[in-house]
Image (cartoon, grey):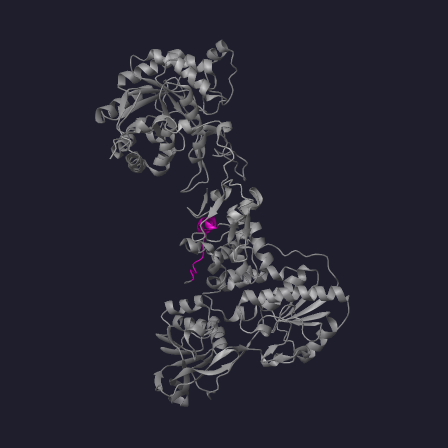
Amino acid sequence: MSSLKTFFCDIDFANPFILAASPSTDDREMVARGFEAGWAGAVLKTTSHESEEVSIAYPIMAALGPGPRMLGLQNIDLLSEKHIHEIAEDIAWLKARFPERRVISSLMARTHAEWKSLVEISEQAGADLIEASISCPQGAELDEDSHASENITPQSGWMVSQNPAQTERVTRWVVQASKGVPVYVKLSPTVTDIAGIGRAVQAGGAQAACAIDTLEGILGINRDNLSPLPSVQGRGTRGGYSGRAVKPVALRCVADLAGALTIPISGVGGIYDWRDALDFILLGASTVQVCTAVMQHGFGIIAGLTDGLARWLDDKGLSNPQEAVGLALDNLTEHDHLPHGVKVISKIDQELCIRCGLCYITCRDGGHVAMNFSTDRRVEVLEERCVGCGMCAQVCPVPGCISIS
Amino acid sequence: MIRNFSPMNWSQAMVEAQRCLGCHEAPCQQACPARVDVPTFISRFREENLPGAAETIYDACPLGAICGQVCPTGDLCEKACVLTDLGQAPIRISALQAFITSQHQPAEKSPVATGRRVAVVGGGPAGLGCAVQLNRLGEEVHVFESGEESCGLVGRVIPAHRLPAEVVERDLLRLRASGVHFHANARVDGALAEKLAKEFDAVFLGTGQNGEVQPELPMEDIQGVHSALDFLTRARDGEIFSVGRRVVVVGAGNVAMDAAVVARQLGAEQVMVIYRRGQSEMPAWQSEYLEACQLGVEFRWLSVVERVHTEVWEGGELRVSGIDLARTRYSENKTNGRRGVEADPSQPVYTQLCDAIIFALGQALDERNDGLFGAATLKGLFAADPTSGQTADPRIFAGGEAVSGGSTVVASMSAGMAAGRSIHNFLSSEGRARL
């Protein structure tokens, strides 16, 4: 079978799958279990300088569509409650036990001096890579001096990665602090032009970019106490939204960055299985990071990720994941350049059809009224009316029953 | 399919509700005699709109809790569920309905009164369905129930494991608060009938089938011989607590299945159902039959009781000791559109020992109701228009089992509701006039 060995920032990874910064990576014993399960690397939960006060208010999680097929996850978690020196011990501990696995130190700071110190301590501890976290929607503000000097008014939700000049400046601080360990910068999707932010990262000298961090959101409201969710004693706050629902946004961001940058990209956002991961790779990600799916289903999902990806590469005659990076980018075009005017229509496999009529409803009220629903509950496509919009195939509960061709 | 009678809790109900696809012109709704809008009530519940869910149920089915418990859904809505075509179990519609109705009972809405009065004779499913419908349409309704409590045979006969008393009470409580006037212990016979005819604008006969077809064998004063309705009523009331080791049930309708199951529950080691026709012509619902099978009830198809053996006990008491069973076969003659059945002389008659016989030969109009309000009867049933329920006398309506014969709670209730609409339409078009 194909090898999954991958290079990212000229460092070799056993496979492209990395544990993203999260509660899953805030405890070295947990990370050790992740490595044993087969994860090639882990971004430890983002840490900070000892001067940073980290006070988490619980509960911190609330899901959209909670349950086994969770759609999205909202968290109001903060940085690791462990500061840089404690994290440095974890880095050294993990590197001593798993020299072949990649330990990535994720950092967040407010001043140049803090950034410098965090990078130096991480490098000394043996971190393989530095992640500059300038994109987390929670608690992300520069100090007063920085704001004043850049003429920026601090406000809730503001983050460095929303401003190209700030991004480039912070990137440069981090890169300059490194004595050789590669640096990548994690970006937020909550920007107008992520390619522009990516260019700032590249201009700042980073070896790679990573996208996306969570989307800033409000999950919902508790209808009894009118508190945003998750509710902390009746009050809530804006948080980071992740999971399946953010994947399309993440893919678009990765594709935008891939089109604009020459440095490699680590893709993250809504990866649950190997097919999701492959989408990121095909749109230009060299490695992928997983957080929500691991938090939900455990480190064991790595087996399905590696198995599925390796078999797909084999099937396509590719010898490693790097050969697949960006292969779909050529097919990503502007709407004007799509092949217009090709007639396609919906086709229903009447053998598979269970006569629920859901396609009929959507076609009647959300399509082109191109279906008949007969008294024996059979749906027929009116070929002259059907434009092949594809909505019927999206609502059909029977896999493989409706196709558009 | 074997009915899962275990009640749901909120968590289970929510998971089950998530499975519903919400079909277009949902087959479950079309399979329901009351046309309960199943996808809508499930989606209301799923959206945590419990009152909306309960109202959707009760709008179509005023006996929502009872039907959630006793509807043969395996033969109705759940049988129609499209999920079975995906190899999945159908949505547990009755369990969802039972749960939702246990959590919320919406009040009946009382519209502007028409000033007219309608008498409903019989407080069973048909009578209650008719009463609710008339009440919703602004008619003043009085229900006359021969017994202590409303709900007819349903409340008296269906075994408690299938229909707990509190479930019946739940639906009745709603109806008692609806504005419908209930008159208990009010058997409508000659004198009262005359009074009602004078005082009410229309009458609905929902007298059901309290009578039973009697066996042709002579067996008066033999201990251990029961009629099924009487047996079930007394078992439910706790008056019968033992039925013997070996029990024979004659007949294969739903009442027979109930009797067989209750006999097992009362400790009978062997319960045998005897039916003169084959299994394919058994009138019982498949779900009821399978439940009986599950409890180890045995079946003897194409068999009839030819003779009852008795023995004299101490004190001179005559008791059942066994039966002679003869085999039958189908004949060329047709009766009521069905194949005829005749004795099969080529098969030997054999003796089956037993301690009790329960006859469940089918129900009939209570003889005392014959000719009530001048309504004509045909083969023990009132003659009425099958859709409107109107009898030869335009002010007298009838519906439910008193018209259709053996049926389900939901079908009788729906027939009553349909008659209620007819009565309202009739009175509205006629203008107010006394009988």
Residue B250 magenta-drawn? no
Identified at 42% across, 34% down, the residue is A243
Q: Nearer the viewer, residue A194 or B122?
A: A194
As drawn, is B254 to the left or to the right of A207?
right
Q: Is residue A391 above or below residue B181?
A: above
Query: Residue A26 placed where, x, y %?
Result: 33, 28
User: Toward which corner of the image does residue A58 lie, by quadrant?
Assistant: top left
Identified at 53% across, 70% down, the residue is B407
Residue B17 magenta-drawn? yes
As drawn, is B417 to the left or to the right of A387?
right
Identified at 60% across, 57% down, the residue is B59
> Would residue B166 be seen by someone viewing this image from the given angle?
yes
Query: Residue B397 placed where, x, y %?
Result: 67, 71
As drawn, is B66 to the left or to the right of A274?
right
Q: Is residue B107 above or below residue B184?
A: above
Query: Residue A55 placed where, x, y %?
Result: 42, 25
Q: Which residues are magenta?
A: B3-20
Q: Which image quarter holds the N terminus of chain A?
A: top left
Q: Is residue B326 above or below residue A143?
A: below
Q: Nearer the viewer, residue B248 or A206?
A: A206
